[in-house]
Amino acid sequence: MNTLVLDRRLSSSEKITHSVHEMLGERRGNWRALLGLVGPGVVVSVAYMDPGNFVTNIQAGAQYNYSLLWVVVLASATAVLFQMLSAKLGVVTGHNLAELSREHLPPALVLGMWLASEVAAMATDLAELLGGALGVSLLCHVPLLPGLIITAAITCAMLLLGNRGFRPLELAIGVLVGAIGMAYAAELFLSPVAWSGVFKGLVGHELPDANALNLAVGIVGATVMPHTLYLHSGLTQARVPVRTDAERTKLVTFTHREVGITLALAGFVNVAMIIASASAFHDHHANVSDIQDAYRILGPAMGAAAAGLFLVALISSGISSSVVGTMAGQVIVQGFVKWRIPLWFRRAITMLPSFFVVGAGINPTKALLSSQVILSLTLSLPMLALVWLTGRRDVMGVHRNRPRLQGVAWAATAAVLVLNATWVLQAFGINAVR
């Protein structure tokens, strides 16, 4: 009876930790404990369906129909690989990527990584807040500035849930992720989809012209986000403290499964975005590239329900990804310089670029694209550090990357960095792809 009373006094996060510890000590896990492990992958998956993805996916579907679907599949596979490495790093070492980088890398390089990460955090928040603000503005028929204020207020309120432990905030983000997924699943039913073309686009490797290649580079380059590489290791580092090597091995296995499932679902959402955009815009509005224009065209083309679902997905994406971006910023600054900045202060600092963009009258879609370029520029260091650290025996012990996995990770890193460099050059008007 006393145990039952004590259990009722525990927070939801503490109950999950207890149930997972019990499960790790058994030969077979119960489904409730396994559900307790679901959370970090859901949080990180937001980065793969954020407003930046909306922009690239709208352009891909409108201009090239279903031809670039295979690029999303490739980008999703790459994301799964790197998020598995990040999650494993946190579980095995009990530290996050920023902390281990500070411990093992030269101070000058660490300083550069931290400053680049702070710039990336602002760029991330710029994209997420503007995306949510666009959705609120279009839904409520208000100017962009009030939409930005509403979006910022909602994200700040959500962040306060973190004071109650990790679970309430994870559940809130999970609800928004579910809203995005269901909205685009419904969009598929409302869209006149040519499924034979979808299948061809998923399994083929067609790039109709140089512009399609540049857009494919943008899709891949914007998918592997630097802040999520830091965040995932931070979410797993102390979520369930392990007591034995056997528990650590089992927890790594479960974590890999959660990452695979959640990011596969995020990949499905991205695929659905391109399919819906291709079905709605390709035949008659192939030049659409602006989120606001896409919404205005969507209603007459596919009906009010389709336009409403688009806004639900966009608002949910903007709010959830903004919350996740702030969480990543906290992990980064605490890991690199051991500063614990009040959440409201950090939120205010990272929101400043968004208010500047709106106040200056800059086109929000162009600002979104510019933020993705900044993220690409800051991606190389965390990717290289992650692969290097997870391949070291003195850091990971028996859980270090096997030679074959390490080779794949280095090859994927090189490919993504080349694609990002190509995209950045293109963004500055240098045609690196002919």
Image (cartoon, rainbow, N blue to C red):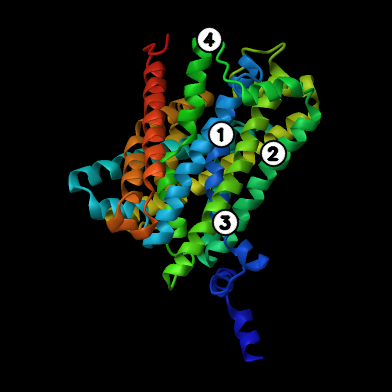
Give the residue type at disc 1: Pro
Could you tell me which residue is drawn at 48 percent across and 68 percent down? Answer: 247
Tell me whether the residue at label 4 lies in contact with that at label 1, contact meaning CB atoms closer than 8 angstroms. no
* Any part of residue 227 in sight: yes
Asked which secondary structure carries label 4, the reply is loop
Give the residue type at disc 2: Val
Q: Local crowd at mark 2 within 10 Å, few (<14), some, or many (≥20)?
A: many
Tell me whether the residue at label 3 lies in contact with that at label 4, contact meaning CB atoms closer than 8 angstroms. no
Q: Which residue is mark 4?
A: 209
Could you tell me which residue is drawn at 59 percent across and 57 percent down? Answer: 38
Tell me where residue 180 appears, x and y as whole percent.
Answer: 67, 41
Residue 312, which numbered label? 2
Give the residue type at disc 3: Gly
Residue 51, which numbered label? 1
Relative depth, front residue between 395 and 52: 395
Q: Which residue is mark 3?
A: 39
Q: Rounded to the nearest whole Å, what is the CA distance between mark 4 and mark 1? A: 25 Å
Give the residue type at disc 4: Asp
Tell me where residue 248 appears, x and y as whole percent.
Answer: 45, 65
Q: Local crowd at mark 1 within 10 Å, few (<14), some, or many (≥20)?
A: many
Which badge, 2 or 1, is on the more N-terminal residue?
1
Which badge, 4 or 2, is on the more N-terminal residue?
4
Asked if 85 appears above or below 358 in the picture, the reply is below
